[in-house]
Image (tube, rainbow, N blue to C red):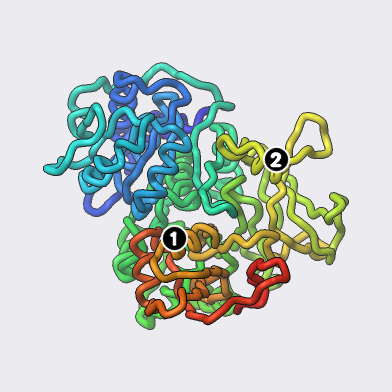
Amino acid sequence: MLLNEFLQDSANRFPEKEALVFNEKRMTYAEIEIQSNKLAHGLIVRGIERGDRVAIYLDNSIESVISIFAILKAGAVFLVINRSTKDQKLAFVLNNCRARAIITDASAAENLDLLKSQLPYMNFAVFTTESQSAEFGIDNLLFHQIMESNKDSLPPVRGIDIDLAALIYTSGSTGNPKGVMMTHLNMVSAATSITTYLENASNDIILNVLPLSFDYGLYQVLMAAKMGATVILEKSFAYPFVVIKKLISEKVTGFPIVPTISAILLQLEALTKYTFEHLRYISNTGAHLPTEHIRRLQAIFPGTRIYAMYGLTECKRVTYLPPDQLAIRPTSVGRGMPNEEIYLVNESNERLGPDQEGELVVRGSNVMQGYWEMPEATAAVLKPGKFPWERVLYTGDIFKTDAEGYLYFIGRKDDIIKSRGEKVSPKEVENIIYNLSGVAEVAVIGIKDEVLGEAIKAFVVPVSGAPITEKEIIQHCAGNLEDFMVPKIVEIRHSLPKTSTGKIRKTELT
C-alpha cells in the first residue's frame, strides 16, 4: 500500500466528511483529494520525476497538507522543513537531498532569491500567496493558478511501497542534520501500529497543534487520513485558551501533546472549570511526562485515557504504555507496539534480561532505510540482526526492563538533547555561537527541565576583554536557529574544564 492511498481510500469512503479544519476553513475528503490531484499534475507537468525530492517550507496550513499528498501522488519524496529554519540550514537541507522544487509562502521569496545561487538543484518554487518581492529561480508558480489550470483526476501510479515517501531531517552529532529515509511501507506500517493501539476510528476528531515538520505532528494528519477521521489543525500552541475552546467546541476525541504543552495546560487555573466529555485520549511523546503531571492531567480529564509513548524519528514509534498501567508503573514508557520486536543488548551485543541496563534495539517494518547518503552514520545504527536478511535499529538509548517487559528510560549514549520533543545537536548550537564575534570557547549541554524535558544551556568563554553578554548570545541564537534550539540559559565563564588532551569535559558542567 502507498501512503497517499490513505487519502484516496477515505475520499472514496467518506467524500463529504470533514477531513481538515484550519482557522475558519473546513475541507472534505473529496476536496483535499481533488486539490492534491491538481497539484500533483502541476508538479509532474513541470518535470518532477519519480523519486525526486520536493520540499514543503510552510507553517501548518491547508496548503501544507495538500502538498504532502500531492508530492506522494506525483511519485516524489516530500520533506517538511520547519518554517523557522534559517537560511544557512535551509540551504544545507535543500542541497543535501538535491530538492527539485519547494512549496512555500510569499514571505520566503526574498530569502530564496538571495539563496538561489547556492541552490543549483532547485528548478522551481510554488508560492501559496502572491509576492511583490524578488522572484526566485527559473520558474515561479502560484498555488491557486495550479488549482485552476490542472486536471483533478488521479495521476497514474508511479511507485511501489518500497520507494521513499519522505525524508525527515533530524539533528546529528556532527552538527549537520541527517535525512531519515522512510519508505511508503515504513510509514504505512508505523501508522497502522499506532492507530491500532490508540483504537482510532473514522469518528475520531484529532486536535493537532504540533508542527508538521515534527514527525509526531505529521503522523496526526497521516493517521487521520488512514482512518477517515477529522484533523483540527492549529498553527501552534501559542494561544492555549484558543486550543481549549477548540477541544470543547469541536468535540475533540484525541489530543497529542509533548511535556511542554502539559506544563502550560497545568498552569491554567481556569482549566478546572471546563469539562471535556468527548476527549477519549491524550497521547504524549518527546520526553516522559512527570508523574505529578500525569496525576493532575487525570484529575482534569477524568474520562480521558492517557498514553505515555516513546519513539524516535528513525522508526517513528517504539513503545506505548497502556493507560491502565499508568498507576502501576508511572515512570515506564511501556512495551513495544504491535508488529514490532524490541530487546536490550549489552556492549558485547548479548541480549539482556529484566533489571539489566542496555541499549534498546528495534526490529520491524517501521525502521528507516538509513540516513540520506550517509553510509557510515547509517551503519552505526542499522546493524545485522539475528537473521541474514535483516538490519535492526540500535537506538542509542539505554533502558532497563522489569519482569513483565515494561521499559524504563535510563539515558542516551550520545549527547543529543531532547527539548520540547525535538532533537537538538549541541554541536549545531555551538557552531552558531562560535560565529559570534568575541567568543573563544563554547560548550552546550542539556539539563533536566520539567517543562521542556531538557533545557539547552550554553557555557561561553569570551575572548579576553570582549564585552559579550548572555542576552547578546541568546539574541544571536534566536536569529540563526529554530526557536526550540535557542539556549534557555547562558553562563559566561573564564574557562571550561578540560581533559589532558584539551577536550572539554561536558560531564563536569551543570
Comparing 447 with 64, the one in front is 447
Side of 387 relative to 52 (left or right) = right
- Disc 1 marks a residue whose amino acid type is Ile
Of tags 1 and 2, the one toward the viewer is: 1
Name the secondary structure under disc 1.
Answer: helix
Disc 1: CA contacts within 10 A as few (<14), some (14-19) or many (>=20): some
Q: Quadrant of the N terminus?
A: top right
Comparing 189 with 498, the one in front is 498
**Quick one: which residue is furthest to the front in this view?**
464
Decide: marks 1, 2 in contact (CB < 8 A)? no
Q: CA distance from mark 1 to mark 2?
A: 28 Å
Name the secondary structure under disc 2.
Answer: helix
Q: Quadrant of residue 34?
A: top left
What residue is at 70 percent from the left and 40 percent from the top? 379
What residue is at 65 percent from the left and 51 percent from the top? 318
Q: Is residue 367 above or below residue 388?
A: below
Comparing 16 with 371, the one in front is 371
* Total labels drawn: 2
- Disc 2 marks a residue whose amino acid type is Ala
Residue 305 numbered mark, or none: none
What percent of the width, then of the height, locates residue 217?
A: 45, 52
What percent of the width, then of the height, locates residue 33?
A: 34, 31
What percent of the width, then of the height, locates residue 83?
A: 34, 51
Q: Is residue 501 visible?
A: yes
Q: Which residue is mark 2?
A: 379
What percent of the width, then of the height, locates residue 345?
A: 82, 53
Residue 432 numbered mark, or none: 1
